[in-house]
Image: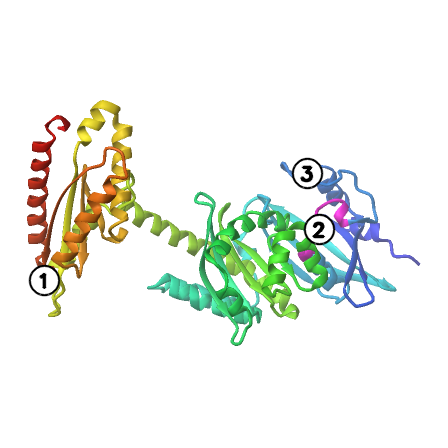
């Protein structure tokens, strides 16, 4: 007597379908079909909530699940483990490209028919995250996630703590390489926050051979990863069959992975709310650990996203408090703090200090004749010229059209050379002329005296300039 799957599905009040899973000759997952669905499940396809659209809005029993939604390796894995391996499974996830959370349950049902096995798939859609469901995890997983939280919460050095975390994650995945890549969609750049390699991994040398251009090109690859993840919350490609989906959706990255020596890949987005911060991936991981890896990283990435967002916010605030927003050099507040530190140094070890004061000649005339935009451009050009001579970490906009360079270890001879070079470079920029004064002290604790002398010498230089060019005042 054939199993009445429709009657079975109708016995559930929540949206439920009966899924069939084909087992291929090699024991892997074949076709996954929707055998039957109750009315709530059918409505989710024919009348989906929100702006989400299905591939077809007509439910036909026995259809491939990919007739309704894009292929999802994680969904196939859950169906396979439930139907074939007879496991009762639960997952609570937020798909990367959808504003909802899915509370999903899979239960095996029988009997099997040859190489076709069955399970139920029950889903509940939440528009707000349910923290109780997110925290409903095993003791082992809770311990591992808690350890990550403790490392990050007690971090004096965030990057060092993240390095410890990425080592733990790589070891949990039993992977050759694990990495967190930050993505800046405004600057269109990528930055490696931390990474870890297995001892003796051949990927280390390949990573060393990557040039700066290779690293920069990663941004062009990374912007396609959201489409690769699609309607899921991650990509876990365990074997060649799964990697075919990566090849189909992102052939360029697939070729890059293969060239790099990647046999499989785990890829999770790192987000704060709906803001994408970056990605975490593991290359050549233990495929048999995939269920544990998915469960662990789903919660760990939720925590990492929050911690990384705080770290980036603090960095932005530090930039805002220390940088001059027009020219990009350090501001007067940062200069005053540095001068205070030098002046109050208690160490017996003495170090020389060099100070250079510059002021723009003719800025008022440029503003009067060409407007403030032209004056702003001249200030930006001045900063660029200074950066050709001095390290950007030694340049401060002291205020208005004045810039100060404070250089530890500098000698009087260095200041003469830098002054000469700066006057030559200024000639490359339209209307750019510097009044320059400098002073070197053998003890950096005397930096205030050096500043006073350099300032006076700069004003002497400016007076000479206007004596020679009276019409440019």
* Secondary element at image label 2: loop
Residue 295, position as x, y percentages in the image = 59, 62
38 and 296: which is toward the camera = 296
Return the x and y of residue 200 as percentages of the image width and height: 53, 76
Tag 2 and tag 1, C-beta contact below 8 Å: no
Q: How far apart are marks 1 and 3 (CA)?
A: 71 Å
- Give the left or right position of residue 299, taking residue 322 as reference: right
Q: Residues within 10 Å of mark 2 (few under 14, many from 20)?
A: some
- Residue at disc 1, secondary structure: loop
Q: Residue at x 15, y 53 (%)?
A: 415
Up/down of 91 relative to 25, above or below: above
- Location of the C terminus by quadrant is top left
Disc number for residue 443: 1
Q: In which quarter of the image is the N terminus?
A: bottom right
Q: Which of marks 1 and 3 is in front?
A: 1
Q: In this view, does 149 lie to the left or right of 410?
A: right
Query: In this view, which residue lies farthest toward the right?
Result: 1
Query: In the drawing, what numbered circle is on residue 55?
Result: none
For marks 1 and 3 on the same chain, the one whose residue lies earlier in the sequence:
3
Q: How far apart are marks 2 and 3 (CA)?
A: 15 Å
Label located before the other in sequence (2 or 3): 3
* Mark 1 neighbour class, 10 Å CA radius: few under 14, some 14 to 19, many 20 or more: some
Q: Give the residue drawn at x 19%, y 32%.
A: 363
Q: Which of marks 2 and 3 is in front?
A: 2
Most foreground residue, 115 or 25: 25
> In the image, which residues are magenta?
65-75
What's the CA distance linking mark 2 and mark 1? 68 Å
Q: Foreground residue, 127 or 206?
A: 206
User: What element does badge 3 sit on?
Assistant: loop
Q: Name the residue under label 2.
A: 71
Instruction: Check if mark 2's residue and mark 3's residue have beta carbons within 8 Å.
Output: no
Label 3: which residue?
53
């Amino acid at each position: 007597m054939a199993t009445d799957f429709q009657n079975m599905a109708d016995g559930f009040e929540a949206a439920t379908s009966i899924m069939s899973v084909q087992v291929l000759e090699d024991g892997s997952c074949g076709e996954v079909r929707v055998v039957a669905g109750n009315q709530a499940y059918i409505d989710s396809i024919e009348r989906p909530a929100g702006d989400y659209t299905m591939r077809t809005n007509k439910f036909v029993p026995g259809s491939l699940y990919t007739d309704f939604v894009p292929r999802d390796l994680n969904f196939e894995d859950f169906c396979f483990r439930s139907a074939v391996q007879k496991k009762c499974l639960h997952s609570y996830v937020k798909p990367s490209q959808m504003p909802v959370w899915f509370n999903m349950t899979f239960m095996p049902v029988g009997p099997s028919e040859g190489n076709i096995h069955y399970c139920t798939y029950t889903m509940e859609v939440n528009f707000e995250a349910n923290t109780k469901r997110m925290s409903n995890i095993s003791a082992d997983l809770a311990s591992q996630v808690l350890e990550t939280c403790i490392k990050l919460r007690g971090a004096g050095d965030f990057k060092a703590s993240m390095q410890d975390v990425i080592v733990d994650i790589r070891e949990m995945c039993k992977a050759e390489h694990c990495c967190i890549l930050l993505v800046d969609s405004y600057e269109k750049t990528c930055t490696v926050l931390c990474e870890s390699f297995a001892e003796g991994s051949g990927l280390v040398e390949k990573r060393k051979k990557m040039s700066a251009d290779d690293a920069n090109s990663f941004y062009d690859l990374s912007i396609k990863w959201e489409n690769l993840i699609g309607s899921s919350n991650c990509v876990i490609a365990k074997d060649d069959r799964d990697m075919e989906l990566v090849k189909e959706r992102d052939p360029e990255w697939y070729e890059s992975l293969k060239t790099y020596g990647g046999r499989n890949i785990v890829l999770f987005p790192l987000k704060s709310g709906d803001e994408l911060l970056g990605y975490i991936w593991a290359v050549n991981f233990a495929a048999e650990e995939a269920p544990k890896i998915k469960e662990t990283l789903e919660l760990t990435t939720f925590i990492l996203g929050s911690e990384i967002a705080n770290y980036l916010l603090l960095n932005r605030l530090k930039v805002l408090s220390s940088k001059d927003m027009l020219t990009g050099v350090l501001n007067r507040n940062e200069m005053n703090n540095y001068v205070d530190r030098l002046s109050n140094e208690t160490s017996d070890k003495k170090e020389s200090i060099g100070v250079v004061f510059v002021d723009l000649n003719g800025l008022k005339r440029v503003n009067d004749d060409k407007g403030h935009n032209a004056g702003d451009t001249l200030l930006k050009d001045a900063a660029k010229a200074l950066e050709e001579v001095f390290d950007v970490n030694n340049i401060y906009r002291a205020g208005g059209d004045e810039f100060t360079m404070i250089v530890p270890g500098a000698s009087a001879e260095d200041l003469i050379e830098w002054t000469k070079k700066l006057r030559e470079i200024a000639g490359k920029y339209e209307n750019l002329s510097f009044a320059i004064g400098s002073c070197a002290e053998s003890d950096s604790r005397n930096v205030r005296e050096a500043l006073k002398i350099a300032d006076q010498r700069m004003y002497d230089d400016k007076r000479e300039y206007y004596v020679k060019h009276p019409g440019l005042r």
